[in-house]
Image: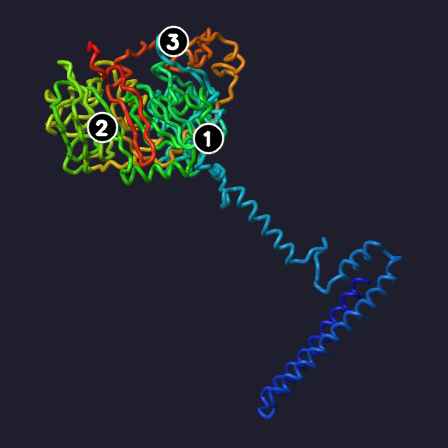
Amino acid sequence: MAWFTCVKGKVSGVNSLLCVGKRENNFLRHLYQNKNVSVKTLGTLRTALNVWRNSAQVSFIRLNFTKQQRYTQLNDMETKGATMEEDSCDTDSTVRTNCGKRKNEETDETARQGRGKKRKRGGKQLRAGERYVPPPQKRNPGVSFSQEHFAETSYYFEGGLRKVHPYYFDFKTYCKGRWVGKTLLDVFKSEFRAESLDYYNKAVKEGRIKLNETPVDDLNITLKNNDFLRNTVHRHEPPVSAQPLEVLVDDGEVVVVDKPASLPVHPCGRYRHNTVIFILGKEKGLSGLHTVHRLDRLTSGVLLFARTLEVSKKLDEMVRERQLEKEYVCRVDGEFPEGEVVCEEPILVVSFRVGLCRVDPKGKESRTVFQRLSYNGRSSVVRCLPLTGRTHQIRVHLQFLGFPILNDPIYGSSAWGPNRAKGGLVGMSDEELLEALIEEHRSKESLHLLDLPDEEVSGKHGLKTECKVSAQEHSDQVTVLESSSGACDDSSCEVPLGEVKAELSQELHKSTSAVESEGEMNGAQKEKNLFSDEAPRTAKSNSFVRDNLCGECKIVRPDPTEKDLIMYLHALRYKGPDFEYSTQLPDWAKEDWLQD
């Protein structure tokens, strides 16, 4: 009965306070209605009432505690449980639950727990049978390649070529908007056509395809927003020239290299380790570089990198304001006219996938100055000064003038017609031109020269044309992630990139079936580069590890010839307000060079 007496006393006290408050309100209302009462008087009365109210409340609390202590002493001998309830009840005038928490506290905690559950489920309640998708992780836009990426595999040299040991690699991506609501089977069938559906079914059985880091057991699973897809593949890279990558300048602000032909600047398409960025990182210890401009894979010459973001922005500003003077040298087919030749034809991008451009009135204004340096009876060496920076500018203008660059797989192709688009005369639509170019190289088994995606090189599927008749070429439109074709690099002039942040930086797949362990790499035979005594010595595996699902492992491809690895275009010199970088003339640009 102690708790009942306690509650009864509290109720009585509360009723007393209510009565007092009611009388105060009536008294104050009466005073306010009396117009003869001054404001000063009302203020004095209010102050007095506040003092009285506080003292009355304190007296009530003291009286209440006195009664509570008395009741506690009387009932302490009867039951300890009642005493505990009474003590918890008496510590506050607010009614509590049996666990000692206020009702509003319990409500707040419940709400917090509910909110936590919602966050764990992605912000909404899941219906029965609905698949949970974790929220996307924050991605660091400033991520660069590191030693972890460089250690994925190693080089070896053979027959004058730099080759890469095959390695396991994870392609990773979040679900794209156009994939939402489609099944994995539909996505692989429409957008990842490099392999057959039979391959993907076998990959699922071996756990190589994961959704949100969980192995997929059925390709008919429907994709949702924020789904994270990981596809592990056995990756082969095409060989490149074993000519050493020479560092011309490294002064703490810029790194200047003499890029050999056949090397892409950064990872794109089938190339990753056989790129300038990876070779500098793996062999020279240079990482975190900012690309200022790009050269096409088949073009050689001066290539600039900025060490810091500040220097990169400074150089980008010089490019935009045309403060950089660029000089190229090339060898063209035929006898180029003597004297200075200026071409100002606008250039339009036909296909970003293949990197195909042409002269068109709807294109962007372009200007190139040419001057013949020598002629050997069959071909001419020409000095080129691009005054604007359009994609393939030098190559397109020389084709328009009727003197395409030797070994140019695109603009020297007969797919353009008997006159090879001299004077801008093509005689076919962009779609027909692109198809004819693909078919010509397919018939010659030289599709690799166009750097097309794997599914088109393999010929497993028809060509997915991407002609942009009215597309306007822009320096920022061809990014690292889109550079799966010849458009990934600019062969005729530099496209300012600012800070190229490659988003292809995936983690190394740690698998027991990896191509080589680090210890095997270090212990394998080493072979010295034939081109230079200072060339790096890298491991060459004694045995080739085959992957049971990899189609490339079952194919023996012939090594590329020298003609496949070079186009006679060279970036000779770069000059700015306070710097100048240059290389030596390549052998094919000298007057005594013998043409086959």
- Residue at 30% x, 28% y is 489
Residue bearing the label numbered 3: 530
Residue 211 image label: 1
Specify which label sits upstream in the sequence, 1 or 3: 1
Q: Nearer the viewer, mark 3 or mark 2?
A: 3
Q: Nearer the viewer, mark 1 or mark 3?
A: 3
Mark 2, secondary structure of its residue: strand
Please identify, in this view, whether the residue under mark 1 or under mark 2 is nearer the observer: 2
| Residue 64 shows in the view | yes
Vertical relation: 2 (above or below) 499: below
Question: Can you tell which quarter of the image residue 183 is in?
Answer: top left
Residue at the spot of label 2: 356
Residue occupying the point 40% across, 31% down: 254
Q: Position of residue 432 (x, y in %)?
A: 16, 26
* Total numbered labels placed on residues in the image: 3
Q: Amino acid at mark 1?
A: Leu
Q: How much space separates mark 3 and mark 2, taking CA atoms? A: 36 Å
Residue 246: which quarter of the image?
Answer: top left
Q: Earlier in the sequence, mark 3 or mark 2?
A: 2
Q: Determine whether, in the image, residue 341 is placed left or right of residue 76.
A: left
Judging depth in this view, the residue of 447 and 97 nearest the camera is 447
| Direction front: furthest residue | 578
Q: Residues within 10 Å of mark 2 (few under 14, many from 20)?
A: many
Classify the position of the N terminus by image quarter.
bottom right
Whole-percent x, y for residue 410 in the image? 21, 22
The picture places residue 493, in percent across and down from the top left corner, at 26, 30
